[in-house]
């Protein structure tokens, strides 16, 4: 399995959901920065399971134990390695799934690829759980980016058919960024929390799940970062985002809506401000032209699929008897992944942006 990404800042994620621990090695970090562990723990808590009605009831502390790369909270330049122990596993829930792969989860393709030797318990290495170490690495990268005046923020853009407001793509202000970071349900329009929660609880009551979208913004990246063609910023962010389980679509700026606009509507007109700085009057391109940043906020949306493990009876196959079968999944699952994926999208974006700038 290859769970490594990055050029200058390289991450390697390891572990399985029901193994002893999961973790990450981060290579290429600069030396000397003091890590604010309170900020790291805050990010871990935003993603941790067991804390919200829209989340799996599996309770984990998600405390990152740092094994190397830090002395007295300061980055040493050695590979940064942290592990997170798995304490609240219930592997019995997965006894049927070994035989009967879950529709929508990785069980069947992983069974074929690894000749049935892959660890199925809790989704093994394919579990959303292994996004916890990514959030750890992202929290460190966020702090390094902040020293460069760059901030990464995200919010729930939709759950089911209930939509939040979008970012102002030309100006995502510090007040909004701080509010979202400290919110237990990050929305621009907080009145949408209740209807969104209802969509999730209605699905749960039907033994079902729902998906949604997340909008992410990066402010403070100067113009001129990125490469043309295959190493463009869109490609680098998309590759990293698609490494996160359940992420199924991405669009930059106005994305698919651009296809219905005229050029006169979609083009972002350039202007100088009173200090001679270049800006654009709109930001339909999401801050990226030709694969290279134009100095405006980088803005993109990610589509999150409904959680595959649902409690309804579902058709599947039986890999032992080689017959068609019915599966009824027992166990603890997120009825909606979107809320917990918000800090994950921020983290993987922060890691990618820091890599691009290193
Ligand atoms: C934070 C997070 C939590 C998740 N929780 C669950 C879950 O409780 N149950 C489940 O079946 N899938 C969950 N997933 C999604 C699966 O891990 C994912 O759908 C599966 O590995 C198949 O990969 P794919 O959807 O990217 O194709 C979660 C994903 C993330 C990012
Ligand atoms: C534990 C987490 O989420 C898990 C992600 C997950 C999956 O299939 O992705 C399945 C469930 O695992 P389990 O059956 O062990 O409870 C979730 O609880 C986590 O994100 O920390």
Image (tube, rainbow, N blue to C red):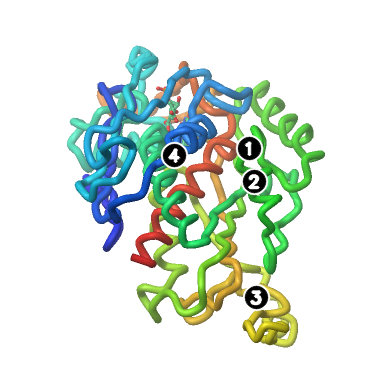
> Which marked residue is nearer to the observer: mark 2 or mark 3?
2
In the image, 196: left or right of 62? right
Label 4 sits on residue: 36
Q: Secondary structure at mark 3?
A: helix
In the image, 198: left or right of 311? right
Contact (CB < 8 A) between labels 1 and 2?
yes
Label 3 sits on residue: 259
Q: Is mark 2 within 8 Å of ligand 1?
A: no
The image quadrant in which ligand 2 is located: top left
Rendered-image quadrant of the C terminus: bottom left
Q: Secondary structure at mark 1?
A: loop
Label 2 sits on residue: 178
Label 1 sits on residue: 182
Mark 1 crowdedness (10 Å alpha carbons): few <14, some 14-19, many ≥20: few
Report how far apart the C-alphas of labels 2 and 4 lie in the structure: 16 Å
Rendered-image quadrant of the N terminus: top left
Of the numbered discs 2 and 3, the one sitting upstream in the chain is 2
> Which marked residue is nearer to the observer: mark 4 or mark 1?
4
> Which marked residue is nearer to the observer: mark 3 or mark 1?
1
């Amino acid at each position: 399995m290859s769970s490594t990404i990055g050029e200058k800042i390289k991450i390697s994620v390891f572990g399985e959901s029901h193994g002893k621990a999961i973790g990450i090695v981060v290579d290429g970090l600069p030396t000397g920065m003091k890590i604010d562990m309170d900020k790291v723990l805050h990010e871990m808590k935003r993603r941790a399971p067991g804390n919200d009605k829209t989340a799996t009831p599996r309770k984990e502390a998600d405390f990152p134990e740092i094994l190397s790369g830090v002395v007295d909270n300061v980055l040493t330049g050695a590979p940064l390695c942290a592990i997170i122990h798995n304490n609240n596993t219930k592997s019995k829930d997965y006894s049927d799934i070994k035989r009967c792969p879950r529709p929508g989860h990785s069980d069947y393709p992983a069974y074929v690829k690894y000749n049935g030797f892959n660890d199925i318990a809790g989704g093994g290495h394919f579990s959303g759980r292994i996004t916890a170490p990514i959030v750890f690495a992202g929290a460190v990268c966020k702090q390094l980016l902040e020293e460069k005046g760059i901030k990464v923020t995200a919010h729930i853009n939709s759950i089911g058919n209930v939509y939040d407001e979008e970012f102002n793509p030309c100006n995502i202000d510090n007040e909004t960024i701080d509010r979202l970071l400290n919110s237990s349900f990050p929305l621009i329009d907080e009145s949408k929390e209740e209807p969104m929660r209802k969509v999730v609880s209605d699905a749960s009551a039907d033994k079902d799940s729902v998906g949604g979208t997340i909008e992410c913004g990066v402010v403070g990246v100067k113009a001129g970062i990125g490469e043309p063609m295959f190493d463009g910023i869109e490609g680098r962010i998309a590759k990293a985002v698609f490494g996160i389980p359940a992420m199924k679509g991405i669009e930059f700026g106005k994305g698919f809506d651009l296809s219905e606009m005229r050029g006169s509507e979609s083009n972002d007109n350039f202007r100088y401000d009173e200090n001679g700085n270049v800006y654009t009057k709109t930001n339909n391109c999401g801050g990226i032209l030709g694969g290279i940043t134009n100095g405006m906020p980088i803005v993109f949306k990610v589509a999150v699929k409904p959680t595959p493990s649902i409690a309804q009876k579902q058709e599947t196959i039986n890999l032992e008897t080689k017959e068609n079968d019915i599966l009824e999944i027992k166990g603890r699952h997120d009825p909606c992944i979107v809320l917990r994926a918000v800090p994950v999208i921020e983290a993987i974006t922060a890691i990618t942006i820091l890599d691009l700038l290193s």
